[in-house]
Amino acid sequence: MDIKENVESVMAKVSAACERAGRDLQDVSVMAVTKYVSAERVEQAVAAGIKHFGESRNDGLLEKKQTIQTPVHWHFVGRLQSRKVKEVVHECDIIHSLDRTSLAKEINKRYQGETPIACMVQVNVSGEETKAGIAPEGLENFVRSLASYEHIQVKGLMTMAPHAENPEDVRPYFRHLRELRDYIQRLKLHHAPCHHLSMGMSNDFEQAVEEGATIIRLGTSLVGNETEREG
Ligand SMILES: *Cc1c(COP(=O)(O)O)cnc(C)c1O
């Protein structure tokens, strides 16, 4: 797999989606999710110009960070167990999966930095039981409640769309997340500027960009999946 080619192909698609939506390409960050691949692949992606990397497991994050010398941005995108918070809270720039009060409490307790840590609140827009995230109805209350954690800054919202054969089918979920983001932004909460929309993965990132994604999270389509068997 040639990562440089993947990056070029993805960037062309992102660029076309931006054009269709009248958006500025610079407002979309492409994150490589590296949970399925080795550090070597991460290095190739760095060489191909990717600056944002996402991991969903602590050991993956720590291991890859160690081997990559170039300064890049690290994101934690997976379900975060409270007891693991202390291991990652100073190792990533953004936590994308803030989805409960107990987690906020733990992040706030463990994080020591001069400026707050950037978090995305994960929202379960599809309502699927298997998915993590705050229900849309509870979002405003949850975000407001985060004001009491001085080390947390709510930079945006994140969602995992349901799997669909046709990516057009998930567009309404992306649109819904954007509307929720706009709503929270209008509240003008000091601790929640809520500018970002972390949405869109390998199968549906073009729809996500058209609907306003500012960070797309690409695993398979960008760096591949080394855990899948060949053939
Ligand atoms: C694995 C993962 C991705 C990337 O998935 P692909 O379909 O391989 O692009 C994105 N976001 C999260 C939270 C993930 O865990």
Image (cartoon, rainbow, N blue to C red):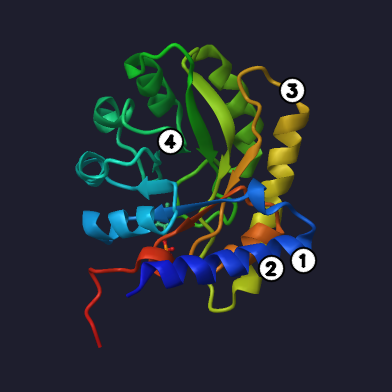
Marks 1 and 4, how far apart at CA: 30 Å
* Amino acid at pointer 3: Lys
Residue 150 in the image: state x and y as whole percent: 50, 12
Which callout, 1 or 3, points at the residue further toward the start of the chain?
1
* Image mark for residue 188: 3
* Amino acid at pointer 1: Arg
For label 1, count other residues whose C-alpha is less than 10 Å away and answer few (under 14), some (14-19) or many (20+).
few
**Residue at 23%, 58% in the rendered image:** 40
* Amino acid at pointer 4: Ile
Residue 60 in the image: state x and y as whole percent: 23, 47
Q: Is residue 123 left or right of residue 174?
A: left
Marks 3 and 2, how far apart at CA: 32 Å
Between disc 1 and disc 3, the foreground one is: 1
* Image mark for residue 20: 1
Q: Nearer the viewer, residue 6 or 158?
A: 6
* Image mark for residue 95: 4
